[in-house]
Amino acid sequence: MSAPLPPALLATLQAHQPLLWLNPQLGSALPASAPTAQQVQAAAARLQRCAGLLAMLFPELAATQGQIESALHDASALYAQPPYHGVQGRCWLKGDHALPVAGSIKARGGFHEVLAHAETLALQHGVIQPEDDRRLLASPDARALFARHSVVVGSTGNLGLSIGIMAAALGFQAVVHMSVEAKEWKKTRLRQRGVTVVEHAGDYAAAVAAGRATAEADPNSYFVDDEHSLPLLLGYAAAAAPLAAQLAARGAVVDAAHPLFVYLPCGVGGAPGGIAHGLKLLFGPHVHCFFAEPVASPCMLVQLASGGDAPLSVYDIGLDNRTEADGLAVGLASPLVAPLMRAELSGVFTVGDDDLFRQRLLVEDHCGMAVEPSAAAAVAGPHWLCNSPAGQAYLAAHGLQGQLADSHHLIWTTGGALVPAEEHQRFRQRGLLLQG
């Protein structure tokens, strides 16, 4: 079909050439359905009141009293040498690749949605009262209730892990529909947790559609819809306040004189979109969010660049959605998130598969962290902003050139803690080979 994209942009995308695209609709009106600050605070409150439950279910959370949070790291070493030297400002890395239990950013939204569903069911059936300790959600009565219900999700891997792990821990029948892009070790991890894995020959969208169809046919089945889920989005948005506290604790001020630039890997858009929205609610015009997408799967870029609400997939413009970044291999952007990002996202930059492995190697060598290739997708963000013509144009348009030296660049890593050692070794060897 004919794609409503500017010819020059279309040609660059079809040639798989990395680029930084700037969003011309940044600052436009938010949709009426945009989550409010109160809704985000309610999600944060739910995670807080369920912290004792989480600490009881998962020994890994005992040390943090059930808090699901990742560390903020100094990433200056990552930008002190080629190819990314010349970045002005202080650089940080937010390590969601090491979030406990689920080992990825998906724990934020995934755990929140399952907990919200469990609360709702338990309240409806009188298993708990609104003021009760949420550790009662692990009681025999609650587990008997949950055993009669299933939680279903379609995933390329990491969301399936977070939903499957949380649902199974509470006693739900957990079912994950996984696409061809999903790694075999992720399927194995889920099965070891008692999760049913249903495999599909199609891509991410096919797995989601199959999961949705099976859930709709069963009144006791709850479908976690990565493309449309507000509870997922709110769980991700709740990450903004803890990050703000971490920055403040490190003496990092965010205001007009000290702008914050955030770079997030993007698949369907739920996790980065939720985080970006939460940050915009907190910091307003002083935070600038950019997504990183594979050159073969830039679904959010394509949707936003089309300028309209009609769905437009990467397949529609001649791309094949084939990438080593399995968690980012998505053909069509979330229709819930895209309208939000039309107003709030500063831009999107794309990355080739070889660069994913090079960037992953840099993170390992200079920050001491083993991440998935897809989790390193955003590493080049500060370089694009500071050293490319498009980045310079963005800074000039927003009057930020004079503040760059006092700015903050934050790279969000998304997955890797549960990756088997042999997989990390394979990633490293490929990175070394590409590095020459």
Image (cartoon, rainbow, N blue to C red):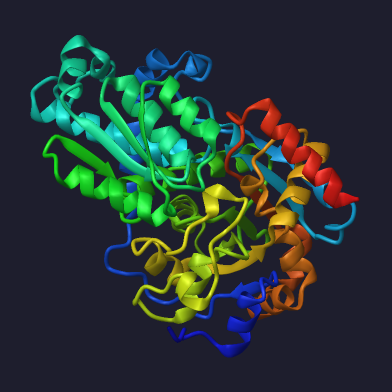
Q: Is residue 320 left or right of residue 381?
A: left
> Is residue 48 visible from the viewing direction of this image?
no
Q: Is residue 209 left or right of residue 366?
A: left
Q: Residue furthest bottom?
A: 7
Q: Nearer the viewer, residue 348 or 210?
A: 210
x and y, in percent, of residue 344 in the image? 47, 67
Q: Is residue 7 left or right of residue 84?
A: left
Q: Residue furthest front?
A: 201
Residue in view at x 64 percent, y 65 percent:
350
Q: On screen, 111 above or below 216? A: above
Q: Nearer the viewer, residue 99 or 310?
A: 310
Q: Quadrant of the N terminus?
A: bottom left
x and y, in percent, of residue 230 in the image? 30, 51
Q: Nearer the viewer, residue 355 or 247?
A: 355
Residue in view at x 66 percent, y 71 percent:
16
Q: On screen, 385 above or below 282? A: below
> Is residue 280 visible from the viewing direction of this image?
yes
Residue in view at x 36 percent, y 70 percent:
30
Residue in view at x 33 percent, y 23 percent:
168
Q: Image quarter for residue 251? A: top right
x and y, in percent, of residue 209 in the image? 30, 53
Q: Residue furthest top?
A: 140
Q: Image quarter for residue 124? A: top left
Query: Total number of numbered labels?
Result: 0
Q: On screen, 193 above or below 352? A: above
x and y, in percent, of residue 145 in the image? 15, 21
